[in-house]
Amino acid sequence: MLLPELKTAYSELIGMPSISSVNPELNLSNRPVVERLANWFADAGFKTEILPVAGRPDQVNLVARIGPVDQADGLVLSGHTDTVPCNPELWQSDPFTLTERDGRWYGLGSADMKGFFALILEALRGIDVGQLQRPLTVLATADEESGMDGAKSLVSAGLELGSYAVIGEPTSLVPVRMHKGILMERIRLLGQSGHSSDPGLGSNALEGMHAVISALLALRNELQARHQHAGFSVPVPTMNFGHICGGDNPNRICGDCELALDLRSLPGMDIPELREQLRQTARQAISERDLKIEFDTLFDGVPAVETAADARLVQYCQQLSGQTAEAVAYCTEAPFLQRMGLETVVFGPGSINQAHQPDEYMDLGQIDPAVGMLRQLVQNFCIADLHS
Ligand SMILES: [Zn+2]
């Protein structure tokens, strides 16, 4: 195998900017990263396929597979190739140059999570791929940090890649088996402005929004009464009113008002259903008023995810790490991989506390254990006799 040294591979990945953003001015293609990965994994003997992302001509996913790929079982190691945007002026060193300092590798994507692919390559050095009894698949996705378009596109493609998936997001090598889901929505009320001295001269959107908020608070109470999960530090679904604006002058009837909110769901709650419930509640609240209502989907949503505590992959990752699987407060591609029929755990080196921050780094102390755990995962799920 002509694979690059770990630090070389790591540096090259950090050196290829692959920022994804809902702001088109910041958004970059992830193709250079995916093509580099495809070359490396091809050199390692993998069959590689670069797949288009529906509706996103500049974005691609990589599926690289090795072993008896016609078999249904097998392990998927998955990560995203994009990073969040950064503010280079707040960094101590260039975010796109892997820089070693104080036992750490600094760089954008060092923990979250381009470095993970370099660790997989490193782990492969210790694995005899000729021994694989079940396929090993490496998934490298696009757009995780923005709309998760890459993962959504994989689900639509209906790929069958195996039975188990580990997503190497930075969890400090503690297995994560659940997180909440999220959706974001904006509600706009359009009334009629007029002189404040006579309410009959207009239709007050702000008063309408007051009714909408009251109704949504009632919906929130109802959701929280119906859904609880002790595995989460905030054990109920939440609804946050994050932004409101409307009207202009105290002596004018408020002609328009808008409210932006997020809703964080528990496993088992359906995102499209929740959005519909939200909209229905808002519509009903103003049905007697002379107001127009509009909705904007600010974030389509990511479902919550839960992999059973006694699932084989959860149990194995707990055994590997010596840590009990937990819940986290951020979203991942796990629900999409789960839809592809994969039992999924989020489990990777580096800390989420460094992700999305200036001076993001990978603690070098995490690297050897991570490489060792990756080798054991492949050994256990792709080589060892599963039923022994
Ligand atoms: Zn990430």
Image (tube, rainbow, N blue to C red):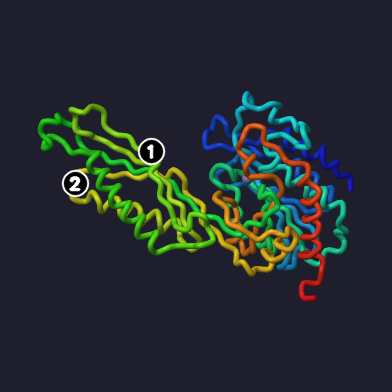
Query: In the structure shown, which secondary structural element does the residue marked by tag 2 occupy?
Result: loop
Task: Judge the density around disc 2: few (<14), some (14-19), many (≥20) Cα neighbours within 10 Å.
Answer: some
Up the image or down, 382 lies above or below 181; here it is below
Pointer 1: what residue? 243
User: Is residue 158 found left or right of 223 in the rendered image?
Assistant: right
Residue at image location 35% in from the left, 45% down from the top: 295
Which percent across, then down, holds residue 160?
66, 62
Looking at the image, which residue is at 56% across and 47% down? 149
CB at disc 1 and ligand 1 closer than 8 Å: no
What residue is shown at x 73% (from left), y 53% (from top)?
138
Residue, far bottom: 388
Whole-angstrom CA distance, mark 2 to mark 1, is: 23 Å
Q: Is residue 356 visible?
A: yes
| Rendered position, 315 above or below 18 | below
Q: Would you call the spot at circle 1 few (<14 residues within 10 Å), some (14-19), or many (20 or more)?
A: few
In the rendered image, which residue does mark 2 sit on?
289
Amino acid type at circle 1 is: His
* Sequence-wise first label, 2 or 1: 1
